[in-house]
Image (tube, rainbow, N blue to C red):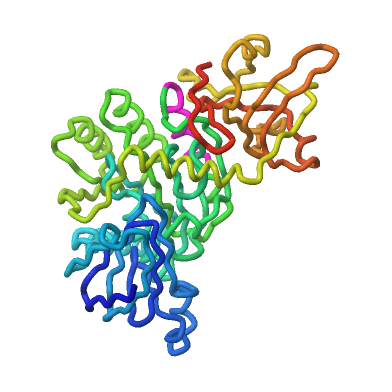
Amino acid sequence: MIREVEKGHTLLVKGPTRVTLLNGKLEIFGKLITPPKERTKEGEEEREYHEEKGVLIIPAGTSYPLYCVEKCKFEIFSSNLDENLMEVDENTISDSWIEIKDKILSFIKKNTDKKPIKIMVLGISSGKTTILKYLANNFLREGLKGGYLDTDLGQQFIYIPTTINIGEISEPLVSGDNIHPEETIFIGATFPKGNFKFILPKESKNLIEKFKQNHEDADFILIDTDGWIKTENGIIYKNFFIKTVDPDIIIVFYDETVEELIKIVEEASQKKERKIFKITELNKYYFEKNKDERRFIRQSLFSKHFASFRKIVLPLDDIKFVKKEYDKEKDEIIEIELDLEELIKLPYHYVITALLTENSELINMALLFNINAEPEKSYILIYSDIPYKEQVKIKKILIGSLRLSTKGNHQGYLYL
């Protein structure tokens, strides 16, 4: 299908859809895209911010706003054009987002002694990742350097669910394919339940510190968060997260009907030098994923990651099975060795795990199939793609709580 869209209009495209820009110029999440034939007319510096082939692949369960800076002509392939396309006569990036972007840019440039500026987004489910992509792309266009910390266990943008990740923003962000994790921390769940609500913030702080050491010239770090707010534990978790990570700026998708959110913002406002921006208007074009769509995306991420996995037998030998706990008195994360006999009694089969070195450094992920602790023939059967030279480094297996099939389908939980 060939479709033309007027200048100043936005074409909202749901996936799965393939869009090729034939003529014109568009902006998506602050990133400029032109057709390949027009790029030779532009400077090298500006070309860095254009899609290489003028082609956008919109995955299922997502929606991209294609804002036409100039009149655009598209070639579109989709299974359902009527449902997946909607044209509106305005920019779906609101004036408040543009104003916030401009103020944060000014703040970063004026506070070079504080860099990297930590910018956290907070809300239930109103476009947190979208506004961070918008900020990242505009920051890049201003020549700034920075990183992206993804702490949403269930809807990871950078890597797979059950982990938190940080990576350098080296190119404009449209999808997770545009950024790669430099450091990964395995949590083992898709929800920060129990002690995870303390472990996740502490590990997030560790990732930020490592990133700062490796990127001394970084101007900013964007911090994506999950939407767990509407419970007393949600308040405890978010307050502890903000206290631990200590963001300089918080962008809040504010809802006066959510009492828990109001309490969290009030607590965050106690630090006077912290800037808080509230987005109060509803985004009428926001694409809200339902539970089935979120589950499908999560399963797809697992399935993609597991595609190269195979069954591997490891000698049990001196490999320890461990879990993470949070010591409130010492305010630190600790490792606890699990009793092997007790673990075998539990439904541990297909539980997601992390393979670690003696120093608890992450080697790879795996699904744990079977543990044979018989004295004459003790071994562990896992599902992973870890090469032999890495297998010999495994000294610990960190047990998660999520049980999955080899295709990424949810199989239940393991409660330790």
Closer to the camera in the image, 257 or 289: 289
Q: Is residue 288 above or below residue 351?
A: below
Hey, which quadrant is residue 284 in on the image?
A: bottom left
Location of the N terminus by quadrant is: bottom left
* Lateral position of residue 188 relative to residue 30, left or right: right
Q: Main secondary structure of the magenta part?
A: helix
Q: Residue at x 32, y 24 (%)?
A: 233
Q: Is residue 51 above or below residue 379?
A: below
Q: Residue furthest right?
A: 376
Q: Residue at x 21, y 72 (%)?
A: 9
Is residue 324 in the magenta section? no
Residue 96 in the image, given as x and y percentages of width and height: 19, 59
Hey, which quadrant is residue 78 in on the image?
A: bottom left
Q: Is residue 52 above or below residue 358?
A: below
Q: Residue at x 52, y 52 (%)?
A: 167
Residue 19 in the image, given as x and y percentages of width and height: 39, 69
Q: Residue furthest bottom?
A: 41
* Lateral position of residue 202 relative to residue 109, left or right: right
Mark count: 0
Closer to the camera in the image, 162 or 255: 162
Hey, which quadrant is residue 309 in on the image?
A: top right
Residue 82 in the image, given as x and y percentages of width and height: 26, 61
* Lateral position of residue 211 relative to residue 273, left or right: right
Question: What span is colored magenta in the figure?
Answer: 194-206
Residue 318 in the image, given as x and y percentages of width and height: 78, 21
